[in-house]
Amino acid sequence: MNYNILAYIIYSIIILLIIFWLGRKLHSIGRIYILALYKEDAKACDSMNNVLLIAYYLFNAGYAFLKLHNWQYVGNREELIYSVGLNIGVLLIILAVSHYFNMTTIYFISRKRKNILPSKNQ
């Protein structure tokens, strides 16, 4: 039996489920933060949120499938479990780091906009 093909199938199914589930979750939750940046302009907020979701899907699914190119040889079931677990773990770390980077960027953009825009009390 070719364990590499089984590893590719298991990895692809699990990682695509994680990517799409997490993308939908971040899309719905992140709308609040983007709406604050766009000063309650819902149409612009939704457009930006949809663009970010598509970029998220393309970046992460592309990286996940690119990872298949550099997959090590899998000779038995133990190596299969180790290999799939390791590659899923690496992708989850990348997802977490990119999410925190995006949230930090949104935070600094919103801070900068608050400093630039005149306050309503003036």
Image (tube, rainbow, N blue to C red):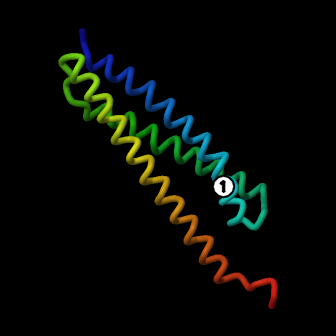
Residue 39, given in percent of the width and then of the height, sits at 75, 67
x 39%, y 36%: residue: 64
Q: Quadrant of residue 117?
A: bottom right
Q: Is residue 108 left or right of residue 2?
A: right
Q: Height in image: 78 above or below 15?
A: above
* 13 left or right, relative to 114: left
Question: Which class describes the residues within 10 Å of circle 1: few (<14), some (14-19), or many (20+)?
Answer: some
Q: Quadrant of the N terminus?
A: top left
* Residue found farthest to the right: 121
Q: Which of the two residues, 40 or 61, is positioned nearer the viewer here?
A: 40
> Residue 12: x and y, percent?
41, 27
| Amino acid type at image mark 1 | Met
Asked which secondary structure carries label 1, the reply is helix
Q: In the figure, 120 relative to 62: above or below?
A: below
Where is residue 20 shown, x and y percent of the image? 55, 35
Name the image quarter holding residue 77: top left
User: What residue is shown with label 1?
Assistant: 48
Residue at left offset 22%, top offset 21%: 78
Quarter of the rendering containing residue 112: bottom right
- Describe residue 7's horizontal placement relative to residue 13 as left or right: left
26 relative to 4, above or below = below
Depth order, front residue of 50/83:
83
- The quarter of the image holding the C terminus is bottom right
Q: What residue is at 68 percent from the left and 53 percent from the top?
A: 31
- Residue at screen point 63% across, 53% down: 30
